[in-house]
């Protein structure tokens, strides 16, 4: 008689291969979620098992397990550029650098005078 541990199930196919497939997909998903440039939408993990006979008497089967991770599109990167014409008459684009707003700071010189900068 076959024991419960010998009976093929999700937990013991390929000595845990299905669980390894899920763990691999899950690692991709959590890495994607931690990326601040990625979408904040949910991800989908699909584990697929294809099972089919491998001989004419149909007493042997083959099992193929794969995983698929669906990640939403990344957040778009947006920037701005100015257009111009160089001295040779060729068009060019130059990215406008992001500028930090001035910070209100106090500068103290060595004579003890305080100046306010904006």
Image (spheres, rainbow, N blue to C red):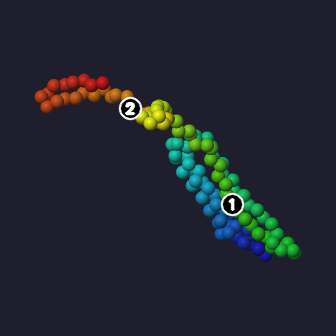
Q: Is residue 21 left or right of residue 57?
A: left
Q: Is residue 61 left or right of residue 16?
A: right
Q: Quarter-wise, where is residue 64 in the image?
A: bottom right
Residue drawn at x 74%, y 67% as measured from the top left = 63
Of the pair 94 and 88, the residue shown nearer to us: 88
Q: Position of residue 99 (x, y in %)?
A: 39, 32
Seen at 16% across and 30% down, the residue is 109
**Residue 57 at least partly seen:** yes
- Residue drawn 64% across and 52% down? 69
Please tell me which of labels 1 and 2 falls first in the chain: 1
Q: Position of residue 39 (x, y in %)?
A: 58, 41
Element assignment for label 2: loop
Residue extending furthest left? Answer: 111
Image quarter of the C terminus:
top left
Quick check: can you spot residue 93? no
Q: Is residue 109 left or right of residue 30?
A: left
Q: At 33% from the left edge and 28% from the top edge, which residue is drawn?
A: 103
Choose top left, top right, bottom left or bottom right for residue 61: bottom right
Number of on-image labels? 2
On screen, residue 24 above or below 88: below
How busy is the neighbourhood of tag 1: few (under 14 within 10 Å), some, or many (20 plus)?
A: some
Is 70 located above or below residue 85 in the figure?
A: below
SS for dot 1 = strand
Question: Residue 100 has which mark?
Answer: 2
Q: Which mark is residue 66?
A: 1
Q: Outermost residue toward the right?
A: 57
Numbered disc in front, either 1 or 2? 2
Name the residue nearer the viewer: 9 or 114: 114
């Amino acid at each position: 008689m076959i024991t419960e541990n010998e009976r093929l199930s999700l937990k013991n196919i390929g000595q845990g291969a299905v669980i390894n497939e899920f763990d691999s997909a899950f690692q991709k998903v959590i890495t994607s979620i931690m990326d601040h440039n990625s979408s904040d939408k949910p991800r989908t993990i699909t584990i697929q098992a294809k099972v089919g006979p491998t001989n004419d008497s149909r007493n042997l089967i083959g099992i193929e397990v794969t995983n698929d991770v669906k990640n939403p599109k990344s957040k778009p990167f947006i920037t701005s550029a100015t257009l111009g014409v160089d001295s040779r008459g060729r068009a060019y684009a130059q990215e406008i650098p992001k500028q930090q707003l001035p910070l209100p700071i106090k500068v103290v010189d060595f004579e003890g005078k305080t100046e306010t900068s904006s």
